[in-house]
Amino acid sequence: MDLESIPGVGEKTARALETLDDPERALQRGDVATVASAPGISQGRAARIVRGAIRRQHDDPGGFLATDRARDVYRELLALLKARTVTDYAAQRLETIYPSPSPSRIEDVQAFARRAIDRECDSAAVRTALEDVESLRTPGDVRVRERCLATTDAERYSSAREAIPELSVEIVEDAQGLAELARGYSTVIALDESFAGVTIDGDVQVRPDALENPADVVPERSLAFYARNRTRLQAAIEVHREAGLEPACDLDALEDGLSRLEADGTVAGDDELDRLTVAVDDLDAAASAAESVANDRLREAIQAQDVTIEGSDLLSLVERGAGVDSLLSRELADEYAAAVESAREHLIDALELDPGEAEIARRAFGDEPTFPVERDEDVISRLRKDLTATKERRAGRLKRELAADLADQREDARRLVRDALELDVELAIARFANEFECTMPTVREPSTTDDEPSVGFAIDGGRSPLLEEPLKEIDPVDYEVSGVALLSGVNSGGKTSTLDLVASVVVLTHMGLPVPAEDVEVRRFDDLHYHAKTQGTLDAGAFESTVREFADLAQGGEGSLVLVDELESITEPGASAKIIAGILEALSENGATGVFVSHLAGEIREMADYDVTVDGIEAVGLVDGELEVNRSPVKDHLARSTPELIVEKLAEEAAEEPVAANGGSPAESPVFYDRLLEKFN
């Protein structure tokens, strides 16, 4: 696949996508999580790239939503779907599901939606677990400072910096240079085979194959991935368990590996490593405390000791330049030795040093008497270096072991999270289908004969999801249209909500999703033109633009669904009826499907040069001043208007009025109302 052929993908983005293991596969399956893992690509950008790739894959020209109102309906439906997601990923992923005229694309999403509807794992526990699931991230800021690579070759130096950027790479001339590095780093890895057999103090490893096995040299790379994503992986594990999903890997093994890893990427749960870490961190404090222990004990001994020195002895000591140290050696030798021993034992016990470490620690306090007692900083420095080196060697070994345990699970871990995130997408669709009592629609291909036109759409028991009322309070609507029809009806009778229902059903059908109805059959359309009701009469320029748009439909709109709400408002009523009649004639001849809501249905039918279908949303009557309406349009029926119903009601009431007390006429004569009613016939 030529990545730059995808809409919205340029050279820079294509290079980023090429860093993925299999970008083509990720794009084809709509894997937003994997695409978003490419450097510099956000989740929202990934969704747009995937959408472009899907269009290219299905040869989808785009533009199904041909008008502002059609796009508004899609956005409102998408918002309803996204509101039922838990993760940000699922909300972004839903944006890759869009209305398309492509049969293969509709079939693909329908298969996905059917699986979603069949899910039976939507529980509070699953939703709670999903809250912590996010797309995995590859950390790019791993640096290891206590280890370095060394080489004598400039070319190998460049290769090493590129292959293992986490470590410093140093150029040395000979073994002496290697020895100098060993004094500054806990571990030095020599890349040149020429250093094999050279004996150098410190942890120096000769690894000519190091660049071929970077995970072994710098296990922090792999562990950082798991440490950075630990919470997300643990949440994905919980989702799989609660939802009963088939996992991509051994959940117990992955969970065990994660439990052995600290948030900073270090290995957890090793007592010896913990001991060494504490010893290094607390060395200075423990040494100072040991000094205090010795000095406090020696001070008490001095205060308790009655020291007597004869004049000849004092003179002899002074002549030799002796000071307090000599006096301590002569008079308090045993007490000093005990004080120093207490300092040594305190240091060893406080740091829990092993015998080898304790041997060095004991030399931190010498046998030569001094007051106050002070540690030997050179010995402390040596002890710190040895403890650090031992700690790093053990940490490195543990990291390598853990990285090896987790090495083969990285792709499975990605899939584990991806499956959990995709479950959220499916559950959102399932919730939408359940809450709006949806069904999967039947999609029909356009008729290829000139006989009776195929059904444009047939909706049984539909309820518009765009209405704000609770679903149970919405009257179900049955409506079927073949060709072009006029829809008449009383004000506030539900004509616009019927158009919204039709638009919603058609948009969801072409998205491949379930629709809010008991049963639906929809012709596969090329595009949807939904014109909302205009506010007031259009000026000449806007009127001209509207007429041009319908002229384009008349020329090439045989695969279009056209929904129009009260087009007569664009100009004077008399002219509107003529224009609408002409538009209907052109669309009918072209084989388009359409519904035009109009209060001028009668006038339009009279002006059209063919038998225009007029359907009506019939009002049963007025009850306590409120319309009582049959929301399902009646086929081939011109619905009565609200004024007609009001006049009819007045006529009935006038006929029932009692005769006036003087024997004259009723309070209101029904004759006037009857005359008005005749005008409606």
Image: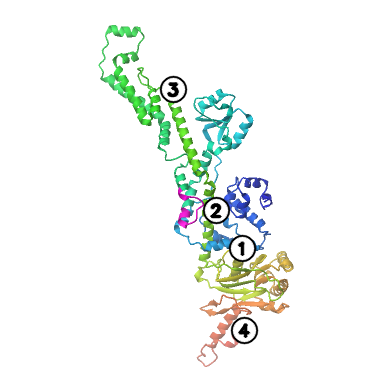
Badge 4 is on which residue? Answer: 676
CA gap, disc 1 and disc 3: 76 Å
At label 3, the amino acid type is Asp
Q: Nearer the viewer, mark 3 or mark 2?
A: 3
Please name which of the two marks, 4 or 2, marks the residue nearer to the observer. Answer: 2
Name the disc covering residue 89, or none.
Answer: 2
Measuring from the top left, give residue 173's x and y in whole percent: 59, 24
* Label 2 crowd bin: few (<14), some (14–19), many (20+), radius 10 Å: many
Which residue is tagged 3?
378
Mark seen at residue 30 = none
**Can residue 527 be seen by looking at this rendering?**
yes
Q: CA distance from mark 3 to mark 4?
A: 116 Å
Element carrying mark 2:
helix
Q: Earlier in the sequence, mark 1 or mark 2?
A: 2
Q: Amino acid at mark 4?
A: Leu
Residue 389, relative to residue 115: is it above or below?
above
Q: Amino acid at mark 1?
A: Glu
Name the residue carrying label 1. Answer: 107
Please give the name of the residue rendered at 30% of the width and 9% of the height, measured from the top-left corner.
Answer: 314
